[in-house]
Image (cartoon, grey):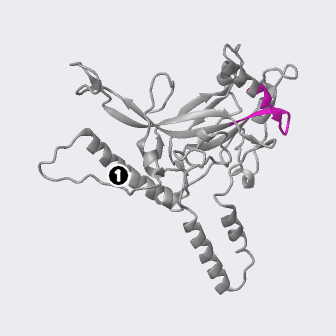
C-alpha cells in the first residue's frame, strides 16, 4: 500500500520510534494468566514488543539499506514524461523496519516540474519554485537538475470495523480502522547540496574507515589478525544508535539528507535530468535534445556495462546504502543449472 495522495490517507504515528530511542527502561512483554482482563492496549503492547525486538536485531545485524529489488529506472529513450520507475523490492530502515513494495511505482518528473512552474499562490510555493531555479547546475554536457529518490516507512490505517466509542462520544455507529498497513512513501526531491557540491553518502564512521584502510599492506599475519580484530571490536562497540542532540525522538540525519525531518528516509537513486533555460533565472525545462543524445549513445563495451547510470538511463542506483547477502543468488543459480 503506497501513499499516492497524502490527502487521501492519514499516516499514523509509529510508537516504535519512541520505543527504539528511549534512553531509559527495558523492553516489556505482556504477562498472560487465566482470568486476566485484556484490553486493546495490551495487544498493542504485544505487537510493539515483537516489532521492537525484531527491528532492534535487524538494525544491529544488518544496518540499513536495500535488501532486494527496488531498482530505479528513468529511460532517456521514448520517455517524454520522464517517467521514473521503482521496481518491487524490500528495504530496511535505520530502526530495522522492513519497507516492502510489491508492484512497480511511477513518478513523472515532467509533471513534477510543471506543477512547480505554475504561478505560486503562496509564499511556500514561491520558495519551492525559486529553489528549483537555483538548483540548476553545470553538468558534463550542459545544465542539469539533480533529483534524489527517497523511500520511507509509513503506517496507514484503513478499513472500518465497529467499536465502542472512545472519548466524549455517545454513538452507536462508532468505527475504528480495521487494519494498519505497513505502507511506504516515495519522494522525489532536489538533491541536497553542501558547499556547492552534491551531498554523497559517507561511511558510518570515519574512524572505522581509517582503521580498515590501515589493514592494507600489513604483511605479518599475526599483526594483520590483531588489527582486523581491533577493527571488529571498534565496529561493534560504536554501532549503538544515539538519538539526535537536536531532537531525542529522532536519529541524527545522514549527510545526504537535507533536513532533520528526513532522518527516517532511505536514498534509492540519484537522477540527473538535462535542462534548458530560456534566459538566466528562468524556470528550467527538460532539454529534449540533450536527453535524445543520451538515448542515442552507443552501447558500452561489456567490461563497462556494470557502471551506473546504465546505458540510456538517467538514474544512478550506485549511491544507495545496501544490505548485501552473498548467498541470495544461490537459489536462482541452482534453478538455472
Q: Hey, which quadrant is residue 156 in on the image?
A: top left
> On the picture, is 278 further left or further right than 79?
right
- State yes or no: residue 135 in magenta: yes
Q: Name the residue under label 1.
A: 50
> On the picture, is 147 further left or further right than 4?
right
- In the image, residue 201 sits, relative to residue 265, either above or below, namely below
Q: Helix or strand or loop: what does disc 1 sit on?
A: helix
- In the image, residue 166 sits, relative to residue 271, either above or below, namely above
Estimate the x, y position of residue 131 in percent, counting from the top left: 74, 28
Disc 1 residue crowd, few under 14, some 14–19, many 20+, Cα 10 Å: some
Q: Hey, which quadrant is residue 132 in on the image?
A: top right
Q: Residue furthest right?
A: 280
- In the image, residue 228 sits, relative to residue 77, either above or below, namely below
Estimate the x, y position of residue 143 in percent, counting from the top left: 83, 32
Q: Which of 163 and 132 is in front in this view?
A: 163
Q: In the image, what residue occupies the spot 48% across and 32% down?
A: 2
Q: Residue furthest left?
A: 35
> On the picture, is 165 further left or further right than 245?
left
Estimate the x, y position of residue 7 in percent, counting from the top left: 49, 22
Q: Which of 274 and 254 is in front in this view?
A: 254
Residue 328 shows in the view: no
Instruction: Give, as a single range, the part of the protein colored magenta.
Output: 132-147
Q: In the image, what residue occupies the spot 63% across and 38% down?
A: 149
Q: In the image, what residue occupies the spot 58% across and 53% down?
A: 322
Q: Hey, which quadrant is residue 70 in on the image?
A: top right
Estimate the x, y position of residue 306 in percent, counting from the top left: 69, 52
Amino acid at each position: 500500500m503506497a501513499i499516492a495522495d497524502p490527502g487521501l490517507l492519514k499516516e499514523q504515528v509509529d510508537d516504535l520510534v519512541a520505543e527504539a530511542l528511549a534512553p531509559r527502561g527495558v523492553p516489556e512483554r505482556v504477562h498472560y494468566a487465566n482470568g486476566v482482563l485484556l484490553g486493546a492496549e495490551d495487544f498493542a503492547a504485544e505487537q510493539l514488543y515483537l516489532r521492537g525486538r525484531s527491528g532492534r536485531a535487524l538494525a544491529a545485524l544488518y544496518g540499513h539499506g536495500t535488501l532486494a529489488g527496488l531498482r530505479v529506472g528513468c529511460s532517456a529513450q521514448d520517455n517524454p514524461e520522464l517517467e521514473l520507475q521503482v521496481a518491487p523490492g524490500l528495504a530496511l530502515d535505520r530502526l530495522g523496519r522492513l519497507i516492502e513494495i510489491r508492484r512497480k511505482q511511477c513518478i513523472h518528473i515532467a509533471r513534477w516540474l510543471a506543477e512547480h512552474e505554475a504561478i505560486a499562490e503562496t509564499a511556500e510555493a514561491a520558495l519551492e519554485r525559486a529553489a528549483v531555479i537555483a538548483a540548476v547546475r553545470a553538468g558534463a554536457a550542459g545544465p542539469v537538475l539533480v533529483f534524489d529518490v527517497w523511500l520511507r516507512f509509513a503506517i496507514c490505517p484503513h478499513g472500518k470495523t465497529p467499536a465502542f466509542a472512545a472519548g466524549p462520544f455517545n454513538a452507536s455507529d462508532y468505527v475504528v480502522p480495521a487494519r494498519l498497513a505497513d505502507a511506504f512513501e516515495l519522494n522525489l526531491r532536489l538533491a541536497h547540496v553542501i558547499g556547492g557540491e552534491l551531498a554523497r553518502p559517507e561511511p558510518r564512521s570515519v574512524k572505522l574507515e581509517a582503521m580498515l584502510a590501515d589493514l592494507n599492506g600489513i604483511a605479518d599475519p599475526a599483526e594483520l589478525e590483531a588489527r582486523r580484530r581491533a577493527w571488529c571490536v571498534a565496529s561493534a562497540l560504536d554501532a549503538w544508535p544515539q538519538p539526535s542532540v537536536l531532537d531525542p525522538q529522532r536519529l541524527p540525519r545522514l549527510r545526504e539528507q537535507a533536513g532533520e525531518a528526513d532522518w527516517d528516509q532511505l536514498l534509492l537513486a540519484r537522477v540527473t535530468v538535462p535542462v534548458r533555460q530560456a534566459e538566466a533565472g528562468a524556470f528550467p525545462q527538460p532539454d529534449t535534445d540533450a536527453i535524445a543524445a543520451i538515448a542515442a549513445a552507443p552501447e558500452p563495451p561489456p567490461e563497462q556495462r556494470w557502471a551506473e547510470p546504465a546505458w540510456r538511463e538517467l538514474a544512478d542506483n550506485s549511491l544507495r546504502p545496501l544490505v548485501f547477502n552473498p548467498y541470495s543468488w544461490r537459489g536462482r543459480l541452482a534453478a538455472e543449472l
